[in-house]
Amino acid sequence: MRGRRTTEPAPDDAADRAPRAVVVVSPDPRRRPARATPWRRVLVGVVLAAVLGGTAVAAAGTLVSQRTAERFAVEDASRDTATVARIVVEPALRDAIAEPDADAAERRQALDGLDRAVRRATAASAAVRVKLWAPDGTVLWSDEPRLTGERFTLSDEDLEALAEDRSDAEVSDLTAPENRYERGQGPLLEAYQAVHVPSGAPLLLEVYYPYDAVLESSASLRTRSRRSPSAR
């Protein structure tokens, strides 16, 4: 027996073409809207950071250069003073200068000879003051006569230079009483070197230079040395 064929109803094409409903969801007020990236502000920040970084690097470089120049200036002042001490001062020294009980006339003659020798040697230099000290702090001679015979306390650096027979330099403390006649000349660099009278007694030679002049001279010498063909 043959069964009955059942025919399914055909899909309704018109129904498929009917428009679908669109669901609109309102934004959640609790959510913060996305913010656009403030590119202009970012760019300004990057530029500012670069400028500040460059300024810091430049400042650090300037500080290093200044410290290097100061070190060279101290070395040059120390070397120049050591040269004056060995070539000019020591040959002119007499035992009477360091002996408190020496004959007055002999002592005066020895000091006059030292005065002539030092003034002749420093006349063309930048030195603004020269002092010769005894280990007890007495100024035995100076190109500033008002200091001669006065007594002050020597610094630890001065005493070390005397004990170790070496030269060194540092920025002068112009507020110190022994430096009162050097005030008003700008910052000074004082270089000191141990010297000896013929008997071997140690004395301390101090030479004061204008700080800026020594710094400039030191920089100029090194610039010429770098440019010299023999330095290559």
Image (spheres, grey):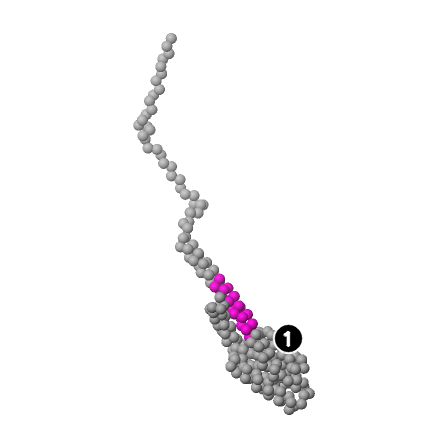
- Compared with 18, 196 (above or below) is below
Asked whether 73 falls inside the magenta stretch, the response is yes
- Compared with 171, 49 (above or below) is above
Please give the name of the residue rendered at 52% of the width and 66% of the height, measured from the top-left corner.
64
Label 1: which residue?
A: 165
Spot the residue most to the right. 101
Spot the residue most to the left. 14
Please give the name of the residue rendered at 65% of the width and 82% of the height, measured from the top-left corner.
198
| 34 to the left or right of 114 | left
Q: Secondary structure at mark 1?
A: loop
| 103 to the left or right of 19 | right
Start-end of magenta stretch = 57-77
Asked whether 222 falls inside the magenta stretch, the response is no
Residue 201 is situated, as x and y percent measured from the top left of the image, at 67, 80
Please give the name of the residue rendered at 56% of the width and 81% of the height, measured from the top-left corner.
129
Please give the name of the residue rendered at 43% of the width and 54% of the height, measured from the top-left corner.
42
Residue 218 is situated, as x and y percent measured from the top left of the image, at 51, 72
Is residue 137 visible in the rendered image? The answer is no
Residue 138 is situated, as x and y percent measured from the top left of the image, at 64, 82
- Compared with 26, 18 (above or below) is above
**Quarter occupied by residue 120:** bottom right
Q: Amino acid at mark 1?
A: Asp
Decide whether the magenta segment is chiefly helix, strand or loop.
helix
Residue 219 is situated, as x and y percent measured from the top left of the image, at 49, 71
Spot the residue most to the bottom. 105
Circle 1 packing at 10 Å, graded few (<14), some (14-19), many (20+), is some
Is residue 1 visible in the rendered image? The answer is yes
